[in-house]
Amino acid sequence: MTVHLLGIDGMDRARIEELLELTDTFDEIGRRPIPRVPALRGKTVATLFFEDSTRTRLSFDAAAKRLSADTLNFAAGASSLSKGESLRDTVDVIASYGVDALVVRHPMAGTPHRIADWTDAAVVNAGDGRHEHPTQALLDAYTLRQHRGALDGMQVAIVGDIRHSRVARSNVLAFSMLGADVTLVAPATLLPDSVAGWPVRVVHDLDAVLPGLDACYLLRMQRERITEGLIPSIREYVAGYGLDAGRAARLPKDALILHPGPTNRGVEISAEVAADPRSVILDQVVNGVSVRMAVLFLLLGSGLDHEPAADGEVAE
Ligand code: NCD
């Protein structure tokens, strides 16, 4: 049976921890002068992106290459989709090149799940609409763990456009599975219609929660998904929820500041705060490659029960 990574929903703590531990190995490999191992030689990883991306796409591509896999890249804007080709035909064409993994980003929730029904390749969800973005959650959990050892008992706030954010959905699940206390901070209009069943506390006042946080996770305003007037103006949003130097001063001295990127400087985060020593935004980017190496290795390597060799090398 082909194993996919479609969401954090469906994973459990043990599985996430296994992945984060394996990521340590790939993090070490990434620091070598030649950060490449032959673990996936002969395998082919295709990225299928129907939405724009910088980090996610490049990091999957880099991860596959560091594992010595061949890569194929499909970008919707430069494809025969513009000539009317269907999603199904596009997937069939790419699959016929003999791919072992398909990394899919699509504006419609559930698309990677449909593609998983159509192909024998392992499918990785690289973001589906406002639904899930599991590898982002894994790299964010890895970044928190790298700085704090463990997420147990951490006070984490996720701030901003929760309503349209697949990152928020995946992160709430992953952080809480790993033992963190998650608070969502947003105006009511930027929250989902219901958070019933979400393992979170919801507050509207960012200033009130800042002093008690271990980590403050800021989200980008998803302007491409906002179809109605949900905030009076960007200026009012910034006044209530933007993390500027004044607000960052209310965070504890050892708190961590995260953002999945791309950042809108001056909206959810000021340029000054993005450069604050407590900001781990670039660590998130670096860790993105290591986490995606671990994901590809687990899906395509010697199977889910495989452990890296004891000397830290990844067996071929
Ligand atoms: C996120 C995404 O695409 O969902 N970005 C990313 O993967 N680094 C968040 C965003 O676009 O705001």
Image (cartoon, rainbow, N blue to C red):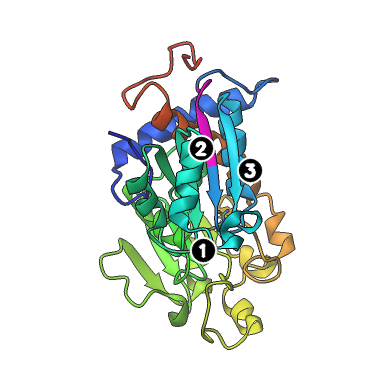
Residue type of the residue flagged with mark 2: Arg
Could you give the CA–CA distance between mark 2 and mark 3, rounded to whole angstroms?
11 Å
Split into quadrants, the picture shows ligand 1 in the one at bottom right
Residue at coordinates 53% horizontally, 39% vertically from top-left?
A: 46
With 152 as the anchor, is 141 left or right in this view?
right
In-front residue for pair 193/52: 52
The residues colored magenta run 40-46
Q: Earlier in the sequence, mark 3 or mark 1?
A: 3
Q: Which residue is mark 2?
A: 292
Q: Is mark 3 within 8 Å of ligand 1?
A: no
Residue 251, visible in the rendered structure:
no
Residue type of the residue flagged with mark 3: Leu
Does residue 107 sit above or below 194 in this rendering?
above
User: Which numbered marker is on residue 211?
Assistant: 1
Q: Which residue is mark 3?
A: 58
Q: Which of label 3 and label 1 is nearer to you?
A: 3
Q: Earlier in the sequence, mark 1 or mark 2?
A: 1
Could you give the CA–CA distance between mark 3 and mark 1, rounded to whole angstroms?
36 Å
Does residue 89 sit above or below 31 in this rendering?
below
For the residue carrying disc 3, how many other residues have a C-alpha within 10 Å: few (<14), some (14-19), or many (20+)? Answer: some
Q: Secondary structure at mark 1?
A: helix
Q: Quadrant of residue 132?
A: bottom left
